[in-house]
Amino acid sequence: MSTRVAGLLLCLVSALLFVPLVASCGGKGAQSTSAAASSAVNSAVSPTVKTGSDADFVKGLCVAAGAFVDRVTKDTQAALTPQPGTDGSPAATPDFGSAFIALFQAIAPAYGTFVEQMAKLKPPPDLAPWFQQAQPKMAAAAKALKDGNFTDPALANLGSDPFPAMPDGPRMRLQALAAKTRECDGLDAFAPPGSTGSFGDAGQPPKHSQKIALQKAATGAWTGPYGTLKFNADGNVDFNIRLCGISNGATNAFGVDDSCEPQEFKGKLTVDDHGFEIGDPGGGANVLQAYIDSSGKLHIGVGSLGELDDDRTGVVDIFAESSLTVKKDGCERANPNGSGMVPVVCKWLTEDGQQVLQFTDALGDTQSLVWVPGQNLLVDPTIFVSAFAK
């Protein structure tokens, strides 16, 4: 299995549980809600919610969360472990289709069990309204996963965590209690959305945001070897971008391929610090990473894009994986089981005339990120090469 296919599989794993990655993987948002999901929503709403203590709720949620993380980690690793062929052939990593099915079969029951355990908890009184709203959303998502319908908009309700975001007041109180609760060790189940933690995104607050520059760039038409970008006056966009990945036979820098058909992204535009979010009528969204280089060209694509400090140290989100911490003397990433950090082989070198950080990914393959010094960015080679001009 190629590195890119393996990365896509990890992305699909993430997509099933942490829905914003569906967009960042180039997936289309859902278009309609299934009748089964609607039924699950209605049946999961109870007229009253029995409430309990802070301590019992925190402990119960962390027990469920810990079991969820452990099971997903174990089962997804097992699904990607090379297996001997039935005909006695040597062990080989599963092909794309087989691996995806195995991963899906491992993840769906884990989330279903998590939802069942959550439904048995008694929330504090000030979380009762949130709990009553969260239960049917989680039940509908679990039903969609079980049925293999991962384009169901019920999955969009998961946000960036296995459950919808809690209101800040109760969440902050419970987060403080969780820090003193043994069952919550290694988890950050009450972290705010978008923060680093076992249940959150690995994002860091941007120090070198290009949001203003990207907003100014979001007008008119842009063209390049990798497609066309049209920013309409009504706030909608129509992008056609070649997202071909890296190929050994490609002659472009870093082996970035441009021979595939363009992928279309249409919808309402939202500008982020380092990218664009394109909403569709079904309530889903596609997220594309982007930046403006020193010559004014717009780079856009799908993959890793993150900031480092001036000394080229910091934490970067790695596409379809966890975050990568870049230090002066090496790199490290969080252990999937939550038990601290593990070292990662990495080094700076020159490739195709650019400074790149070469590192070993979660599957043991070698990857590279290109350094963009003017913006303090580390970007996927496919984004670095995919440049557009007016």
Image: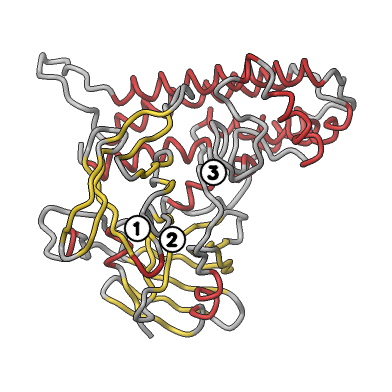
- Percent position of residue 172, x then y: 75, 36
- Label 1 or label 3, whichever lies nearer to me, is 1
Residue occupying image coordinates x 30% and y 35%: 344
Identify which amino acid the numbered label 3 is placed on.
Val
- Mark positioned earlier in the residue sequence (1 or 2): 2
Q: Residues within 10 Å of mark 3 (few under 14, many from 20)?
A: many
- Secondary structure of the residue carrying tag 1 is strand
- How many numbered circles does the render carry? 3
Identify which amino acid the numbered label 1 is placed on.
Val
For the C terminus, the image quarter is bottom left
- Percent position of residue 282, x then y: 60, 56
Residue 323: quarter of image: top left
- Mark positioned earlier in the residue sequence (1 or 3): 3
For the N terminus, the image quarter is top left
> What mark, if any, has residue 289 been given in the picture?
2
- What residue would you read off at disc 3? 19
Chosen colour scheme: secondary structure
Q: For residue 154, say whether it is visible.
A: yes
Residue 79: quarter of image: top left
For the residues bearing labels 1 and 2, Cβ distance under 8 angstroms: yes
Identify which amino acid the numbered label 2 is placed on.
Gln
- 192 or 228, which is in the foreground? 192
